[in-house]
Image: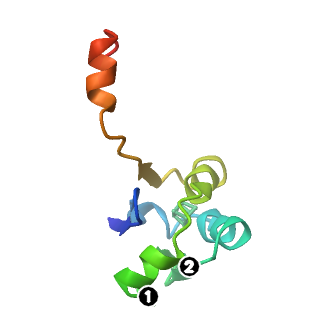
Amino acid sequence: MLEIKERSIIIRIDTSKCEACETKACAAACKKFARGYLQIVDGKPSVEHLTPEEVLRLGTECLACEIACKFEGNKALEIEVPIKGLDEYLAKRGLA
Ligand code: SF4
């Protein structure tokens, strides 16, 4: 599992699904819609060429990699977007 922390989101990639992925759509989407920091190394997405500080600086939180992986890849990538107060809001509205 690869975990990438940007400023307000966490990207988690089950890289065991990536070697069989023919499109590598995540990296292509990152390059097309953001700054292209996600690279494919040995058949898997990687940010090893960057420091954590560089990931924070380059990450645009555009979510393109998740959409690309879901529709064109092997559904290996999920993005957590923590929203402060959401649980309390949903509970207050009876939606939790
Ligand atoms: S598109 Fe999804 S399955 Fe394919 S390499 Fe990227 S994260 Fe892995």
Mark 1: is the Cβ under 8 angstroms from ligand 1?
A: no
**Residue at the (39%, 64%) spot, across then down:** 16
**Residue 23 can be seen, yes or no:** no
Q: Which image quadrant: the N terminus? A: bottom left
Residue 37 has which mark?
Answer: 2
Q: Three-letter amino acid code at disc 2?
A: Tyr
Left or right, residue 3 beside residue 21: left
Q: Residue at x 34, y 11 (%)?
A: 93
Q: Is residue 63 left or right of residue 50?
A: right
Q: CA distance from mark 1 to mark 2?
A: 8 Å
| 62 versus 85 height, above or below | below
Q: Is residue 96 above or below residue 25?
A: above
Asked if the residue under mark 2 is in contact with the one under mark 1, i.e. CB atoms within 8 Å, the reply is yes
Position of residue 92 in the picture relative to residue 75 (left or right): left
Q: Pointer 2: residues within 10 angstroms few (<14), some, or many (20+)?
A: many
- Amino acid marked by disc 1: Leu
Q: Give the SS element for disc 2.
A: loop
92 or 22, nearer to the observer:
92
Image location of residue 34, percent across then percent down: 65, 69
Task: Give the residue drawn at x 35%, y 45%.
Answer: 82
Task: Spot the residue most to the right.
Answer: 32
Determine whether 48 is above or below 28 in the image: below
Q: Is residue 61 above or below residue 49?
A: above
Q: Quadrant of residue 2?
A: bottom left
